Image (tube, helix red, strand yellow):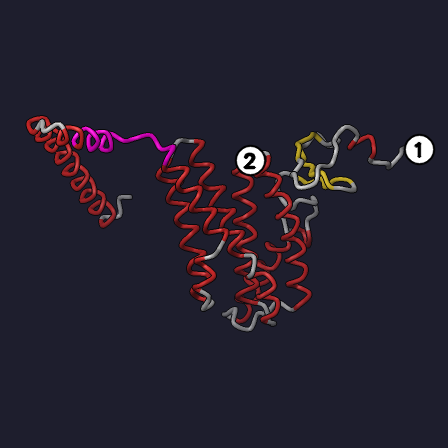
Protein backbone atom coordinates (compact mmCIF):
# COMPACT_ATOMS: atom_id res chain seq x y z
CA UNK A 1 0.00 0.00 0.00
CA UNK A 2 1.41 3.37 -1.07
CA UNK A 3 1.77 5.92 1.72
CA UNK A 4 0.07 9.28 1.26
CA UNK A 5 2.36 10.91 3.84
CA UNK A 6 3.89 14.09 2.32
CA UNK A 7 6.79 14.17 4.80
CA UNK A 8 9.31 12.71 2.31
CA UNK A 9 8.32 15.38 -0.23
CA UNK A 10 9.08 18.32 2.07
CA UNK A 11 11.96 16.73 3.94
CA UNK A 12 14.93 19.09 3.85
CA UNK A 13 12.75 21.96 2.64
CA UNK A 14 12.10 23.87 5.83
CA UNK A 15 9.33 26.41 6.12
CA UNK A 16 10.68 29.91 6.83
CA UNK A 17 8.21 32.46 8.23
CA UNK A 18 8.10 35.78 6.36
CA UNK A 19 9.94 34.24 3.41
CA UNK A 20 8.37 32.93 0.22
CA UNK A 21 9.79 29.49 -0.52
CA UNK A 22 9.03 28.27 -4.03
CA UNK A 23 10.45 25.66 -6.37
CA UNK A 24 9.68 24.02 -9.70
CA UNK A 25 9.52 20.25 -10.00
CA UNK A 26 8.53 17.70 -12.63
CA UNK A 27 5.38 15.82 -11.69
CA UNK A 28 4.64 12.13 -12.14
CA UNK A 29 2.84 13.09 -15.36
CA UNK A 30 6.10 14.45 -16.75
CA UNK A 31 4.86 18.05 -16.63
CA UNK A 32 6.45 20.94 -14.77
CA UNK A 33 4.77 22.04 -11.53
CA UNK A 34 5.23 24.89 -9.07
CA UNK A 35 5.38 24.14 -5.36
CA UNK A 36 4.87 26.77 -2.66
CA UNK A 37 6.03 25.83 0.85
CA UNK A 38 3.54 26.48 3.66
CA UNK A 39 3.85 26.03 7.41
CA UNK A 40 1.89 22.76 7.38
CA UNK A 41 2.83 21.45 3.96
CA UNK A 42 2.81 22.85 0.46
CA UNK A 43 0.71 23.95 -2.48
CA UNK A 44 1.36 22.32 -5.83
CA UNK A 45 0.21 24.14 -8.94
CA UNK A 46 0.21 23.63 -12.67
CA UNK A 47 2.32 26.19 -14.55
CA UNK A 48 -0.47 26.96 -17.04
CA UNK A 49 -4.23 26.77 -17.13
CA UNK A 50 -6.05 26.68 -13.82
CA UNK A 51 -3.49 26.14 -11.02
CA UNK A 52 -5.28 23.09 -9.62
CA UNK A 53 -5.41 21.50 -13.07
CA UNK A 54 -9.22 21.30 -13.14
CA UNK A 55 -11.38 22.34 -16.08
CA UNK A 56 -14.73 23.56 -14.74
CA UNK A 57 -17.55 22.96 -17.23
CA UNK A 58 -14.92 21.93 -19.76
CA UNK A 59 -13.32 25.39 -19.78
CA UNK A 60 -9.84 26.42 -18.77
CA UNK A 61 -11.29 28.25 -15.77
CA UNK A 62 -14.51 29.66 -14.37
CA UNK A 63 -13.62 33.00 -15.92
CA UNK A 64 -13.86 31.50 -19.40
CA UNK A 65 -17.07 29.70 -18.42
CA UNK A 66 -18.81 32.91 -17.37
CA UNK A 67 -17.50 34.80 -20.38
CA UNK A 68 -19.07 32.10 -22.56
CA UNK A 69 -22.36 32.45 -20.65
CA UNK A 70 -22.34 36.17 -21.36
CA UNK A 71 -21.85 35.55 -25.09
CA UNK A 72 -24.70 33.03 -25.07
CA UNK A 73 -26.91 35.55 -23.26
CA UNK A 74 -26.09 38.24 -25.82
CA UNK A 75 -26.79 35.86 -28.69
CA UNK A 76 -30.19 35.03 -27.18
CA UNK A 77 -31.32 38.49 -26.05
CA UNK A 78 -29.19 40.79 -28.20
CA UNK A 79 -27.67 42.46 -25.14
CA UNK A 80 -25.90 41.65 -21.89
CA UNK A 81 -27.80 44.24 -19.84
CA UNK A 82 -29.89 41.67 -17.96
CA UNK A 83 -27.00 39.28 -17.30
CA UNK A 84 -26.07 39.10 -13.61
CA UNK A 85 -23.64 37.22 -11.42
CA UNK A 86 -25.17 36.20 -8.10
CA UNK A 87 -23.34 35.89 -4.80
CA UNK A 88 -22.37 32.27 -5.36
CA UNK A 89 -21.00 33.05 -8.83
CA UNK A 90 -18.84 35.84 -7.43
CA UNK A 91 -17.67 33.71 -4.51
CA UNK A 92 -16.56 30.95 -6.87
CA UNK A 93 -14.69 33.43 -9.03
CA UNK A 94 -12.97 34.92 -5.99
CA UNK A 95 -11.89 31.49 -4.75
CA UNK A 96 -10.51 30.66 -8.16
CA UNK A 97 -8.69 34.00 -8.22
CA UNK A 98 -6.89 33.07 -4.99
CA UNK A 99 -5.35 30.11 -6.80
CA UNK A 100 -3.93 32.45 -9.45
CA UNK A 101 -2.79 34.84 -6.71
CA UNK A 102 -0.68 32.11 -5.10
CA UNK A 103 0.75 31.18 -8.48
CA UNK A 104 1.70 34.69 -9.57
CA UNK A 105 3.43 35.28 -6.24
CA UNK A 106 5.35 32.05 -6.86
CA UNK A 107 6.19 33.15 -10.41
CA UNK A 108 7.61 36.41 -9.07
CA UNK A 109 9.82 34.53 -6.66
CA UNK A 110 11.01 32.27 -9.50
CA UNK A 111 11.55 35.34 -11.73
CA UNK A 112 9.08 33.93 -14.23
CA UNK A 113 7.72 37.35 -15.09
CA UNK A 114 5.82 36.23 -18.18
CA UNK A 115 3.80 33.86 -15.99
CA UNK A 116 3.29 36.56 -13.37
CA UNK A 117 2.10 39.04 -15.99
CA UNK A 118 -0.31 36.49 -17.46
CA UNK A 119 -1.88 35.61 -14.11
CA UNK A 120 -2.15 39.19 -12.81
CA UNK A 121 -3.77 40.29 -16.08
CA UNK A 122 -6.13 37.35 -15.81
CA UNK A 123 -7.20 38.28 -12.29
CA UNK A 124 -7.80 41.87 -13.37
CA UNK A 125 -10.22 40.51 -15.97
CA UNK A 126 -12.10 38.82 -13.11
CA UNK A 127 -12.24 42.16 -11.29
CA UNK A 128 -13.71 43.76 -14.41
CA UNK A 129 -16.21 40.94 -14.87
CA UNK A 130 -17.55 41.17 -11.33
CA UNK A 131 -17.58 44.98 -11.34
CA UNK A 132 -19.73 44.96 -14.46
CA UNK A 133 -22.09 42.06 -13.80
CA UNK A 134 -22.36 41.46 -10.02
CA UNK A 135 -25.96 41.71 -8.82
CA UNK A 136 -24.86 42.82 -5.35
CA UNK A 137 -22.53 45.78 -4.83
CA UNK A 138 -20.99 43.99 -1.85
CA UNK A 139 -19.46 41.45 -4.21
CA UNK A 140 -17.88 44.28 -6.18
CA UNK A 141 -16.42 45.93 -3.08
CA UNK A 142 -15.06 42.62 -1.82
CA UNK A 143 -12.66 42.56 -4.78
CA UNK A 144 -12.13 46.19 -5.74
CA UNK A 145 -10.15 46.94 -2.59
CA UNK A 146 -7.39 44.72 -4.02
CA UNK A 147 -7.33 46.23 -7.52
CA UNK A 148 -4.43 48.67 -6.85
CA UNK A 149 -2.29 45.79 -5.61
CA UNK A 150 -2.92 43.62 -8.67
CA UNK A 151 -2.36 46.59 -11.01
CA UNK A 152 0.96 47.23 -9.26
CA UNK A 153 2.03 43.59 -9.56
CA UNK A 154 1.06 43.51 -13.23
CA UNK A 155 3.08 46.68 -13.91
CA UNK A 156 6.08 45.22 -12.08
CA UNK A 157 5.91 42.03 -14.15
CA UNK A 158 5.69 43.94 -17.43
CA UNK A 159 8.59 46.20 -16.41
CA UNK A 160 10.71 43.21 -15.39
CA UNK A 161 10.14 41.60 -18.80
CA UNK A 162 11.27 44.83 -20.50
CA UNK A 163 14.31 45.24 -18.26
CA UNK A 164 15.48 41.72 -19.12
CA UNK A 165 15.49 42.91 -22.74
CA UNK A 166 17.19 46.20 -21.73
CA UNK A 167 14.14 48.13 -22.96
CA UNK A 168 14.32 50.77 -20.26
CA UNK A 169 11.88 53.26 -21.74
CA UNK A 170 9.23 50.57 -22.22
CA UNK A 171 9.73 49.49 -18.61
CA UNK A 172 9.28 53.06 -17.41
CA UNK A 173 6.18 53.35 -19.59
CA UNK A 174 4.58 50.29 -18.01
CA UNK A 175 5.38 51.56 -14.52
CA UNK A 176 3.84 54.95 -15.30
CA UNK A 177 0.80 53.26 -16.83
CA UNK A 178 0.34 51.30 -13.60
CA UNK A 179 0.53 54.50 -11.54
CA UNK A 180 -2.00 56.18 -13.84
CA UNK A 181 -4.43 53.25 -13.54
CA UNK A 182 -4.21 53.31 -9.74
CA UNK A 183 -4.75 57.07 -9.77
CA UNK A 184 -7.87 56.65 -11.93
CA UNK A 185 -9.13 53.93 -9.58
CA UNK A 186 -8.98 56.23 -6.55
CA UNK A 187 -10.28 59.29 -8.40
CA UNK A 188 -13.24 57.36 -9.80
CA UNK A 189 -14.04 56.29 -6.25
CA UNK A 190 -13.74 59.83 -4.91
CA UNK A 191 -10.69 58.86 -2.82
CA UNK A 192 -7.90 60.96 -4.34
CA UNK A 193 -6.24 61.31 -0.92
CA UNK A 194 -5.65 57.53 -0.82
CA UNK A 195 -3.68 57.74 -4.06
CA UNK A 196 -1.18 60.09 -2.47
CA UNK A 197 -0.52 57.64 0.40
CA UNK A 198 -0.82 54.42 -1.64
CA UNK A 199 2.09 52.08 -0.89
CA UNK A 200 1.56 50.45 -4.29
CA UNK A 201 2.13 53.80 -5.99
CA UNK A 202 5.14 54.59 -3.81
CA UNK A 203 6.64 51.20 -4.64
CA UNK A 204 6.17 51.79 -8.37
CA UNK A 205 7.78 55.22 -8.02
CA UNK A 206 10.75 53.66 -6.24
CA UNK A 207 11.11 51.12 -9.05
CA UNK A 208 10.88 53.92 -11.61
CA UNK A 209 13.74 55.78 -9.91
CA UNK A 210 15.83 52.60 -9.86
CA UNK A 211 15.22 52.05 -13.57
CA UNK A 212 16.12 55.66 -14.34
CA UNK A 213 19.38 55.39 -12.39
CA UNK A 214 20.34 52.13 -14.12
CA UNK A 215 19.34 53.29 -17.59
CA UNK A 216 22.43 53.72 -19.79
CA UNK A 217 22.82 57.23 -21.22
CA UNK A 218 21.66 57.80 -24.78
CA UNK A 219 23.70 59.65 -27.40
CA UNK A 220 21.51 62.68 -26.70
CA UNK A 221 22.27 62.45 -22.98
CA UNK A 222 25.99 62.26 -23.70
CA UNK A 223 25.88 65.26 -26.03
CA UNK A 224 23.96 67.34 -23.50
CA UNK A 225 26.55 66.49 -20.85
CA UNK A 226 29.36 67.43 -23.23
CA UNK A 227 27.56 70.68 -24.04
CA UNK A 228 27.30 71.63 -20.37
CA UNK A 229 30.99 70.84 -19.88
CA UNK A 230 31.95 72.96 -22.92
CA UNK A 231 29.91 75.92 -21.66
CA UNK A 232 31.50 75.65 -18.19
CA UNK A 233 34.96 75.72 -19.79
CA UNK A 234 33.84 78.64 -21.99
CA UNK A 235 34.75 76.61 -25.06
CA UNK A 236 32.05 78.24 -27.14
CA UNK A 237 33.28 76.86 -30.44
CA UNK A 238 32.90 73.30 -29.12
CA UNK A 239 29.55 74.22 -27.56
CA UNK A 240 28.29 75.50 -30.92
CA UNK A 241 29.38 72.29 -32.63
CA UNK A 242 27.55 70.15 -30.07
CA UNK A 243 24.42 72.33 -30.36
CA UNK A 244 24.45 71.73 -34.11
CA UNK A 245 24.60 67.97 -33.53
CA UNK A 246 21.73 68.14 -31.05
CA UNK A 247 19.66 70.23 -33.46
CA UNK A 248 20.22 67.72 -36.26
CA UNK A 249 19.14 64.94 -33.93
CA UNK A 250 15.98 66.84 -32.96
CA UNK A 251 15.19 67.57 -36.62
CA UNK A 252 15.56 63.88 -37.45
CA UNK A 253 13.23 62.95 -34.58
CA UNK A 254 10.62 65.44 -35.80
CA UNK A 255 10.85 64.10 -39.37
CA UNK A 256 10.46 60.54 -38.10
CA UNK A 257 7.42 61.58 -36.06
CA UNK A 258 5.81 63.22 -39.10
CA UNK A 259 6.57 60.13 -41.21
CA UNK A 260 4.95 57.83 -38.65
CA UNK A 261 1.85 60.02 -38.40
CA UNK A 262 1.54 59.89 -42.19
CA UNK A 263 1.88 56.11 -42.23
CA UNK A 264 -0.73 55.74 -39.50
CA UNK A 265 -3.09 58.01 -41.39
CA UNK A 266 -2.68 55.83 -44.48
CA UNK A 267 -3.24 52.67 -42.48
CA UNK A 268 0.31 51.45 -43.14
CA UNK A 269 1.16 50.63 -39.51
Q: Is residue 221 magenta?
A: yes
Residue drawn at 15 percent across, 34 percent down: 246
Task: List x then y, in percent, for residue 30.
Answer: 70, 29
> Could you tell me which secondary element the residue under label 2 belongs to?
loop
The quarter of the picture where residue 105 lies is: top right
Cα separation between marks 1 and 2: 38 Å
Q: Is residue 223 left or right of residue 68?
A: left
Q: Which residues are magenta?
A: 213-227
Task: List x then y, in percent, for residue 84.
Answer: 59, 69
Task: Determine whether 58 is above or below 216 in the image.
Answer: below
Which badge, 1 or 2, is on the more N-terminal residue? 1
- Quadrant containing the N terminus in the rendered view: top right
> Could you tell me which secondary element the residue under label 1 belongs to?
loop
Q: Is residue 225 magenta?
A: yes
Circle 2 residue? 112
Q: Is residue 252 left or right of residue 216?
A: left
Residue at the left extreme, as displayed: 237
Circle 1 residue? 1
Of 197 and 157, nearer the camera is 197
Task: List x then y, in percent, for residue 257.
Answer: 21, 43
Q: Is residue 172 left or right of residue 55?
A: left
Q: How many marks?
A: 2
Residue drawn at 39 percent across, 48 percent down: 176
Residue drawn at 46 percent across, 51 percent down: 201
Of 115 and 10, nearer the camera is 10
Task: Determine whether 252 is above or below 119 in the image.
Answer: above
Quick one: label 2, few (<14), some, or many (20+) residues within 10 Å? some
Principal secondary structure, stretch drawn in magenta: helix
Amino acid sequence: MNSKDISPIIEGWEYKPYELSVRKIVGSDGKEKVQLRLDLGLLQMEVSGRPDGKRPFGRESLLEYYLDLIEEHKAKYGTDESFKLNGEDCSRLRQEGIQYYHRYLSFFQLEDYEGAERDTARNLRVFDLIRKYAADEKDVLALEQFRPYVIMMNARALAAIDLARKEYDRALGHIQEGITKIKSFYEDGGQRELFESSWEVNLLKDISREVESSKPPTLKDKLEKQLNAAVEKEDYEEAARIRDELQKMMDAEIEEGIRRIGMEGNGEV
